[in-house]
Amino acid sequence: MQNFYLTDLDKTFLRTDLSVSDFSRNVFNVAVSNGVKLSVATARSYTGVCKLLKGLHLKEPLIVLDGVMITSADGDIIYVSALDRDIGDEIIEIGKQQADIFPLLVGLDSNGVERFIYPKQRNRYQEELLRTYHNDRRLLDADPLKAMEKNLKIVYMESEEVTAQIELALKEKFKDEIEIKRSKDPYMDCWFMTVMHAKGDKAHALKKLEEIEGVNREHTTVFGDSHNDLGLFNAAGRKIAVANAIDELKAVADIVLPWTNDEDAVARFLKDELKG
């Protein structure tokens, strides 16, 4: 059975400046042209992936939005796990009650169009992130902030203490109805807490993708660096951490590479393994 390779993007395949080196691009494209099943699993949206990976030959389905969605290489939605409007509104209310802050929402409107909804009351971290999405047609301001019909990700950006406080309240309320990923943001001095459907994580998405690709767990290799890759590692046959990965991920990895993301760790491994 053919092997399937799946890599995280930020701080794993991408360099820290969010670029893809010529070396990594060439290794990726040669592998795909030779029939290797190679794709990505990322917290980013499909649109964000396409912008960052421009010039890469994407053929296999992609895991995006931390596993909430699987899309085809052309952007068609194959699989989605979303929080409904009622739960979304409750999550927003709990954040307001606990810390008087509002999240940003990533979801699908009634026409199935992807939207990023920002609250009118924003903190400095949200403002900074908003600037990176300048002129993005998916952006909408909302006052009052209300959940969408299908909420893919509900994201809080604040201190470690504040996000932990909200996380505790959400877990007490919803228990196993939701999935929460909380970690330090790799680019800003804050903590990122993402609330999703209980099956909206990389681990569940990987199992679904293995069905789609016709491969089993033993033939799946994944690459990662951070907390949101732990589930992915637990669900994969072979787990590979880059040198700059967090200690928790290295502890469960089968292989810890001697190179960082800025040294093209994933591409170096693939070139050696595939003899490209």
Image: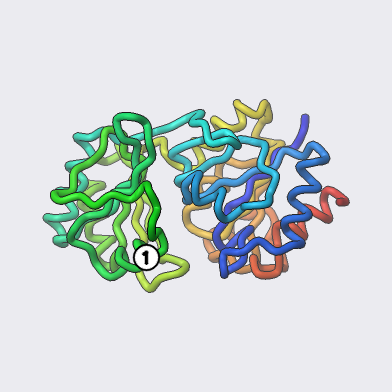
Residue 264 is left or right of residue 72, and the answer is right
- Quarter of the image where the N terminus is located: top right
Residue 235 picture quarter: top right
Please state the horizontal and vertical placement of residue 147, each as a whole percent of the image: 23, 41
Where, by quadrant of the figure, is residue 210 drawn?
Answer: top right
Residue type of the residue flagged with mark 1: Arg
Please report the residue visible at 36 percent of the width from the left and 40 percent of the height from the top: 152
Eyeballing the image, is 137 above or below 78?
below
| Residue 169 x %, y % | 20, 52
| Observer able to see residue 196 | no
Mark 1 highlights which residue?
A: 131
Which residue occupies the foreground of this view, 134 or 227? Answer: 134
Q: Is residue 95 left or right of residue 275?
A: left
Q: Residue at x 22, y 37 (%)?
A: 87
- The residue depicted at 19 percent of the width and 58 percent of the height is 120
Left or right for 271, reference 224:
right
Give percent across and percent down for residue 228. 47, 53
Decide which of 46, 13 is in the foreground and name it: 46
Q: Left or right: 107 with respect to 33?
A: left
